[in-house]
Amino acid sequence: MINVSKRLEVNPAGEVKLTRAQVWEGLVQKARNPIGYVKPMESCKLVEEAEGGSPFIREVRLHGETLQELITLFPQERVEFVRLSGGARGIIKNIIEEENGTLFLRFIFTFSLEGVEAGSAEEKAFADGMENSYCEAVNTTLGKIRAQSAA
């Protein structure tokens, strides 16, 4: 089982300041269409959506694999992605946190890999790659939100 949790400051010195509402809107946009936010994401389409917009199921092509994810929006708080198919199953959470007036964006992922021994070098390599990819996606998301707010 792979468990990773990382927290990034939303408004480091020298960057355009973002509000919780702006971060939330960016997370929703990324959940609905991750193209341009998550580099390895090749395609995305919504396949099912509850009345009111949450939860919904999207089908994505990631690293050449087509898979489905159930996405639930918890307004102004977090987005949860449950991997329904594919070789890596689990959950990803994007959580907006605030501590002493400072906004943070935390991502957590808990995954198991089909056919891969827990604690193996293969599992560690997957975890490291996913952590790096996800840090990049979070930074890309914050950058896109800043660009939109400055426009």
Image (cartoon, rainbow, N blue to C red):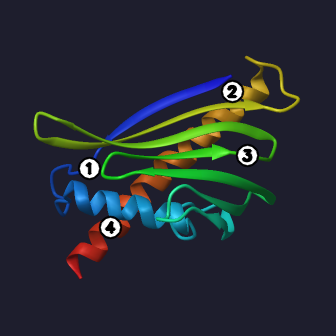
Which residue is most to the right? 115
| SS under mark 3 | loop
Which residue is most to the top? 119
Q: Amino acid at mark 2?
A: Lys
Q: Nearer the viewer, mark 2 or mark 1?
A: 1
| Marks 2 and 1, how far apart at CA | 28 Å
Q: Residues within 10 Å of mark 1 (few under 14, many from 20)?
A: many
| Marks 1 and 4, how far apart at CA | 11 Å
Q: Nearer the viewer, mark 3 or mark 1?
A: 3
Q: Is residue 115 left or right of residue 129?
A: right
Q: Nearer the viewer, mark 2 or mark 4?
A: 4
First in sequence, mark 3 or 2: give its number.
Answer: 3
Which residue is most to the bottom? 151
First in sequence, mark 2 or 4: give its number.
Answer: 2
Give coordinates of residue 51: x percent, y percent: 52, 65
Q: Which residue is under mark 1?
A: 10
Q: Amino acid at mark 4?
A: Ile
First in sequence, mark 3 or 4: give its number.
Answer: 3
First in sequence, mark 1 or 4: give its number.
Answer: 1
Numbered tag placed on residue 124 in the rendering: 2
- Relative to 145, does residue 27 appear above or below in the rendering? above
Which residue is most to the front? 51
Discs 3, 1 touching: Cβ within 8 Å: no
- Relative to 124, does residue 102 appear above or below in the rendering? below
Q: Is residue 41 left or right of residue 22?
A: right
Q: Nearer the viewer, mark 3 or mark 2?
A: 3
Q: Which residue is under mark 4?
A: 145
